[in-house]
Image: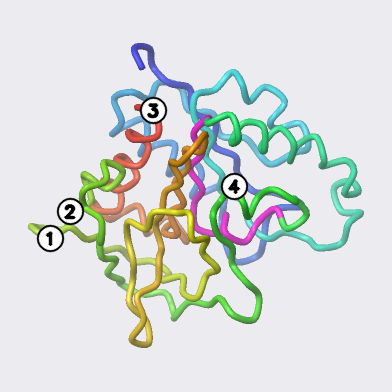
Amino acid sequence: MTRSARVLVLSGRGRYEDPWHDMAATSHRVADVLRGTVDAVGEVVVRGSFPDALDDVDAFDLLVVNCASGRSDPGFDGDDATWVPFHEALRRWADAGQPVLALHQAANTFADSPHWERVLGGRWVDGASMHPPIDEATFEVVDAAHPAVAGAQDGDRARIVAFDERYSFLRVSQDVRVLVTQRHDGVDHPVVWVRDGGAARLVYDALGHDVRSYDSPSRRALLASEVGWLLAG
């Protein structure tokens, strides 16, 4: 990419917000990290998840999804039919191979979309998925050959250390490439993966519960590497 990229950060509100995540704060922190660390990034726009939020998505080079589970009642913020164009715009964008970075609670958003789990390559499953209490956590890079994790170093090790949640027991598709895991109850759980087969170009990154995650240099480096790879395609 020869020009500076325009990035749209979609920040959960209303239908796609929850009481556990300050998505406005994390969305703006992500924007600050991208402006400060990724040379290819120019303008970063943070926008709430309104039904028309993706009407001009083709004017951007990268879509970042930072949305959550939200209200389940179908009449909140408009009925389900009101949101069909929004979800169709996201499906078209992803299926055309346009880059998507999905963060943390994005594994538990857009339950009303027939497309999102396929696009994402995974899902938070109520009653099965969980996380231990938030703490200083270690996330191991298990596929260091992929450029999306090229900068993810803590000292001399290919790992990320951050104050964050460790998502566990997500439902993960067989067609993703797992790059980072965390260990819980003797099991290695995928927390960062990519889809780059066919038209797809997506990174799911389960880190980023709150702004404290982005205080970590290795976590910021991971985010920068992910975005660099997505924009290089």
In this figure, which residue is indicated by the disc labeled 2?
Answer: 153
In this figure, which residue is indicated by the disc labeled 3?
Answer: 233
SS under mark 3: loop
Q: Label 3 to label 2, Cα distance in Å?
A: 23 Å
What range is drawn magenta here? 98-110
- Quarter assignment of residue 123: bottom right
**Numbered label tally:** 4
Q: Is residue 224 left or right of residue 156?
A: right
Residue type at mark 1? Answer: Arg
Residue type at mark 4? Answer: Val
Q: Position of residue 107 (x, y in %)?
A: 57, 59
Q: Label 3 to label 4, Cα distance in Å?
A: 17 Å
Give the number of the mark in front: 4 or 1: 4
Q: Label 2 to label 4, Cα distance in Å?
A: 28 Å
Residue drawn at (92%, 54%) of the image? 75
Q: Which mark is residue 157?
A: 1
In the rendered structure, does residue 100 fall within the stretch colored magenta? yes
Q: Which mark is residue 30?
A: none
Q: Earlier in the sequence, mark 3 or mark 1?
A: 1
Residue drawn at (58%, 29%) of the image? 96
Residue situated furthest bottom in the rendering:
185
SS under mark 2: loop
Q: Label 4 to label 1, Cα distance in Å?
A: 31 Å
User: Is residue 226 or residue 215 the one in the foreground?
Assistant: 226
**Crowding near the residue tagged with mark 4, few <14, some 14–19, many ≥20 C-alpha atoms within 10 Å:** some
User: Is residue 98 or residue 81 the one in the foreground?
Assistant: 98
Residue drawn at (55%, 68%) of the image? 171
Q: Earlier in the sequence, mark 3 or mark 2?
A: 2
